[in-house]
């Protein structure tokens, strides 16, 4: 895990001082070293000369640099200086700046060695570079891992950039006058002169409505774009032309008649295999552990590997550390489940206690690190877990991110399955599944407000789920909720037909693809990346190995929802591996925080002072509506959803202040 930046001059020399400033903005992503590649024309014929700083002094400060790459290193594999980047091999004029991990780099290296390629490091970076030299852009189909990288291909005079299939690692770019620039984080781009931090008003309103800022290439700044997951971008340095291109598409495989028991066995083996590969590291590895099914799955699989295959878990050493957020409020505390899992595998559990006074001191720093606003206070719990891991000396953390999207954990997937049973006329199955869901008694499942974006307008009004934001927003709330690209519109489109002629996907599978690639997961991955990198940690997400994602998506709906259970196949596959108190758990919290209590009690003086102040966000919301509402609800008597809206407004305000946006 590292930070990458780059500038390609388009008719103007590269501002090397600006490149340095960009790299410095990401020092938290890589405190273990930095490096720069500077390239400038070497006469005619499109050839370039290169300098790698600080290791050479071949750069003539008067030379008109046309390409610059910068890198901040977080050393995970081969801790020696041989792993410093940007990296090249031999006298090649092909250089790479890479952020991420290639989990099958050992297999790729062996294959490349048989083809005559030599290696001087043990890094996956060198394997990736040699793979590009051998196969060009086609190397992407061979990679298993998380990555965002840029290759300066000197002989071709082009910059080749790519992002992993699920968008686990970030890549942002912009085109200020006379340059193409890119970085791992938006804040690094803003260090480049001439790039204006102007908000995209429509995207800002979309955040307030949907609590999401991460839709494809769009960000909250008009000048900044994200390279979408599973996309490449090739820039011709001579002409300045570039175009993003998709290289992978997520879609369910056609079912081959395999028995359900065989599918579950296959899932178990796949989860073990991918977890084993995610443990490869030359530095200490630990795991987040919320007490939910997903993080408990990861920890339990690690424990099994640790016991049965110690050579595959060398990075754990003699001590496997887990990190859990806890509270005195029982309704949001999950330590009972987390400790059951930690003790079952012999892990050393670290209990972290997020507190409102600490949150207040942290809020501004979180806003800066996250690059864009975040929709819930729950991310503060994640922040505290990352901080605890840093304090404990852990450098790599595995997490259970993605399990809900891949295996059908959200309440809306239950509703989609029931809708499919209804439409297909399977009345007995519908009655049985509906009855089992009701008997589960899980309030998360039964609370339809969790899916308010998918509800018709009149029903939303009756339930009162959007009362605060709807009243405070300057603009058409209903239009924003039901816009063409919103989750609500996509739900009705998916429910209206069972495929588009090009895919055999069910309604549930189409919703899963939407969650994984567009709606839910991109935002969660941004939060995970920034929270971990703020403390110079590498966060790995084995449940989002693309083989696992494709396998989970392709499972029949009945193996995701069955007899009232969500993530049914996952629960079955983990029988005997994970404690039953968690495997058969009916409640669902995630990284919860007692946000309503904090906002109405412990943090009331500070929240009052903030919203009574002059608000930068007044462009989007009416401050007087917000103030009147808050004064009228001193005891937290309003609906819980209104406090989620309140926090979004606070988060937007803090973000605008952190980046001086008006």
Image (cartoon, helix red, strand yellow):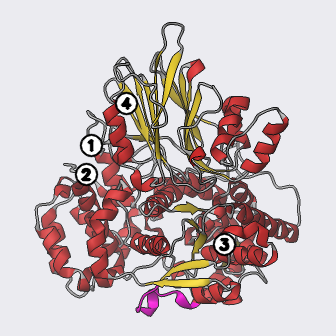
Q: Residue 283 at what x, y percent from top left? A: 60, 64
Q: Which mark is residue 659?
A: 2
Residue labelled with disc 1: 197
Return the residue found at the far top. Answer: 44
Residue pictured at 53% horizontal, 41% vertical:
85
Instruction: Evaluate whether residue 399 shows in this view.
Output: yes
Instruction: Evaluate whether residue 639 shows in this view.
Output: no
Contact check, label 1 and label 2, Cβ < 8 Å: yes
Secondary element at image label 3? helix
Contact check, label 2 and label 4, Cβ < 8 Å: no
Q: Nearer the viewer, residue 456 or 449?
A: 449
Q: Nearer the viewer, residue 51 or 448?
A: 51
Secondary element at image label 4? loop
Residue labelled with disc 3: 316
460 inside magenta stretch: no
Q: Nearer the viewer, residue 318 or 18?
A: 318
Secondary element at image label 2? loop
| Closer to viewer: mark 2 or mark 3 | 3
Q: CA distance from mark 1 to mark 3?
A: 43 Å
Residue 336 figure quarter: bottom right
Residue labelled with disc 4: 175
Which numbered disc, 1 or 3, marks the residue that appears first in the sequence?
Answer: 1
Which numbered disc, 2 or 3, marks the residue that appears first in the sequence?
Answer: 3
Label 1 crowding class (10 Å Cα cut-off): few <14, some 14-19, many 20+? Answer: many
Examine the rendered structure and indicate whether residue 319 appears above or below residue 500: below
Residue pictured at 55% horizontal, 58% vertical:
515
Label 2 crowding class (10 Å Cα cut-off): few <14, some 14-19, many 20+? Answer: some
Which numbered disc, 3 or 4, marks the residue that appears first in the sequence?
Answer: 4
């Amino acid at each position: 895990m590292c930070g990458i930046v780059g500038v390609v001059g388009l008719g103007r020399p590269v501002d090397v001082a600006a490149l340095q400033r960009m790299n410095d903005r990401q020092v938290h992503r890589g405190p273990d070293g930095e490096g720069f590649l500077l390239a400038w024309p070497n006469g005619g014929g499109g050839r370039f000369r290169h300098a790698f700083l600080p290791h050479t002094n071949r750069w003539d400060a008067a030379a008109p640099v046309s390409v610059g790459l910068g890198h901040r290193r977080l050393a995970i594999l081969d801790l020696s200086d041989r792993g410093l980047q940007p990296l090249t091999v031999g006298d090649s004029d092909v250089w790479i700046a890479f952020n991420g991990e290639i989990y099958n780099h050992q297999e790729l290296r062996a294959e490349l060695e048989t083809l005559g390629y030599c290696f001087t490091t043990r890094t996956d970076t060198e394997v990736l570079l040699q793979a590009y030299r051998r196969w060009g852009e086609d190397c992407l189909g061979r990679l298993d891992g998380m990555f965002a990288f840029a290759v300066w291909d000197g002989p071709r005079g082009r910059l080749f950039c790519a992002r992993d299939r699920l968008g686990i690692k970030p890549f942002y770019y912009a085109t200020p006058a006379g340059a193409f620039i890119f970085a791992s984080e938006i804040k690094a781009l803003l260090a480049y002169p001439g790039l204006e931090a102007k908000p995209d008003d429509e995207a800002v309103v979309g955040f307030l409505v949907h609590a999401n800022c991460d839709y494809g290439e769009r960000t909250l700044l008009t000048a900044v774009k994200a390279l979408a997951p599973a996309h490449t971008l090739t820039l011709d340095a001579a002409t300045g032309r570039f175009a993003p291109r998709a290289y992978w598409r997520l879609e369910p495989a056609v079912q081959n008649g395999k028995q359900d028991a065989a599918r579950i066995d296959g899932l178990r083996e796949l989860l073990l295999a991918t977890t084993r590969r995610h443990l490869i590291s030359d530095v200490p590895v630990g795991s987040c552990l919320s007490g939910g099914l997903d993080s408990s799955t990861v920890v339990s699989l690690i424990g099994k590997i640790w016991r049965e295959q110690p050579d595959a878990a060398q990075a754990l050493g003699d001590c496997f550390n887990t990190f859990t957020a806890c509270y005195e409020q029982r309704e949001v505390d999950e330590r009972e489940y987390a400790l059951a899992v930690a003790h079952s595998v012999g892990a050393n559990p670290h209990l972290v206690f997020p507190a409102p006074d600490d949150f207040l001191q942290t809020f501004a720093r979180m806003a800066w690190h996250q690059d864009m606003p975040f929709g819930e206070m729950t991310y503060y719990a994640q922040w505290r877990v990352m901080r605890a891991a840093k304090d404990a000396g852990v450098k790599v953390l595995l997490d259970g991110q993605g399990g809900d999207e891949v295996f059908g954990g959200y309440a809306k997937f239950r509703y989609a399955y029931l809708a499919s049973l209804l439409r297909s006329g399977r009345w007995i199955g519908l009655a049985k599944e509906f009855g089992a869901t009701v008997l589960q008694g899980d309030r998360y499942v039964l609370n339809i407000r969790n899916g308010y974006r998918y509800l018709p307008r009149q029903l939303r009004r009756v339930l009162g789920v959007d009362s605060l934001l709807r009243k405070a927003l300057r603009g058409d709330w209903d239009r924003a909720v039901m816009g063409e690209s919103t989750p609500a519109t996509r739900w009705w489109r998916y429910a209206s037909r069972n495929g588009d002629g090009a895919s055999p996907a069910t309604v549930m599978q189409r919703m899963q693809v939407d969650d994984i690639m567009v709606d839910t997961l991109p935002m969660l991955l941004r939060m995970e990346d920034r929270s971990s990198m703020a403390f110079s940690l590498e966060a790995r997400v084995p449940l989002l190995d693309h083989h696992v994602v494709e396998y989970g998506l392709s499972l029949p709906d009945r193996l995701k929802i069955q007899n009232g259970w969500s993530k049914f196949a996952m629960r079955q596959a983990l029988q005997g591996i994970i404690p039953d108190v968690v495997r058969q758990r009916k409640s669902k919290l995630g990284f919860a925080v007692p946000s309503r209590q904090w906002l109405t009690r412990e943090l009331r003086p500070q929240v009052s002072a903030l919203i009574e102040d002059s608000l930068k966000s007044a462009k989007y919301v009416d401050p007087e509506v917000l103030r009147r509402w808050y004064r009228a609800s001193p005891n937290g008597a309003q609906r819980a959803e209104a406090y989620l809206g309140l926090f979004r407004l606070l988060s937007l305000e803090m973000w605008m202040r952190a980046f001086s946006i008006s």
